[in-house]
Image: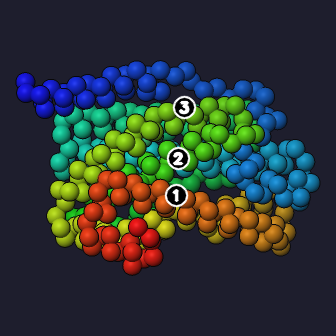
Amino acid sequence: MNAAVELAASQFFESVNKWYASATVRNSQRILVPETAKGEFTYPKSRQLLSEHPKVQALGHDGVAYVLAQSAYQYMYEIGLLETRFVIDCSLNLINNVIAGASEEEKLDALTVVIDEGYHAHVALDYIIQMKAMTGIEPLEVPQSNGNLDAVRRAFEQLPPAMHNDFQLISVTLAEHTLTKDLISIGREKGASQAFTKVMTDHVSDEGRHASYFAKLMSAHWKRLPEETRLVIGRMLPAYLDDYLAGDADRSLDRRILLACGFDDNEAATILAQTQSEFAARLDGYIATTRANLVKLLQRTGVLDHPPTREAFVAYGIAL
Ligand SMILES: [Fe+2]
Ligand SMILES: [Fe+2]
């Protein structure tokens, strides 16, 4: 073996060994929601503005716990959707050459992502089912999509079908990067239940590995894309970032939660209006920080070395 092949082989075995040693699916115990969950605030209050509003507080401990439980369900369902409808799909596309060009070693790593993400979706649904049983609170809805999936669907509508799979790899890479940072941040919030925090911290311990895997792959894949594909995807990327980060900007779930708490349409509208400026400020802050992180990722992976893509970002008003 020459030195380069030997180095590649040792790096490869390092990633396999790392997965065996650290993947939560191989090393973690089932996360149990304790019986005390009934009286607990599951989700961090700092992440759900409604829980701090005087009218919601006036509902008492159980009312606040109900609002936070709905937010926790929503968060867990969104994780399941992201894993099963997006990241696993992309990884299978890499394994089966629908996204062309992955090496066998990269395919083996993609299989670990499929297994990890299947497990994360399992943990999230297991948590939801246990919580329903312990608290008796039913989720208001089982979402069939989320902001990220909706934005990808809209992007696909703009793109020629032949470019969908290449775009999928880029959008999954962005999502994995964002998710890693989001999980770190929500896992640090005070006031969430112990079980909820454990789901977050376990999950993020796998996501760092995924984020670097996809970043490396996207970097290589971008370079081998036909110039026409780079031009088309590069042009739409800046607006896509904002579209996918906007999330539930119209607060439709918040409105449904308030109605389910027993508020009428007018009261719900008032509470939403009274919390709107803080909601918008937090969302804008989140979008600005996350967008800056993603632009850094696109720089680091060489996507912005492509002059027309770089120009598209500048034209969109993003300082590079
Ligand atoms: Fe995951
Ligand atoms: Fe992941």
Residue in the image at 47% along x and 27% along y: 24
Q: Quadrant of residue 156?
A: bottom left
Label 1 SS: helix
In contact (CB < 8 Å): disc 2 and disc 1: yes
- Residue beneath label 1, please? 290
Mark before the other along the chain sequence, 3 or 1: 3
Q: Quadrant of residue 276?
A: bottom right
User: If the image is split into quadrants, where does the C terminus sit?
Assistant: bottom left
Q: How many marks?
A: 3
**Real-space Cα separation, disc 2 to disc 1, in angstroms:** 9 Å
- What is the crowding at mark 1: few (fewer than 14 residues within 10 Å), some, or many (at least 20)? some
36 or 264: nearer the viewer: 36
Q: Is residue 297 left or right of residue 166?
A: right
Q: Percent position (x, y) of residue 143?
A: 56, 54
Q: Mark 2 belongs to which amino acid?
A: Lys
**Real-space Cα separation, disc 3 to disc 2, in angstroms:** 14 Å
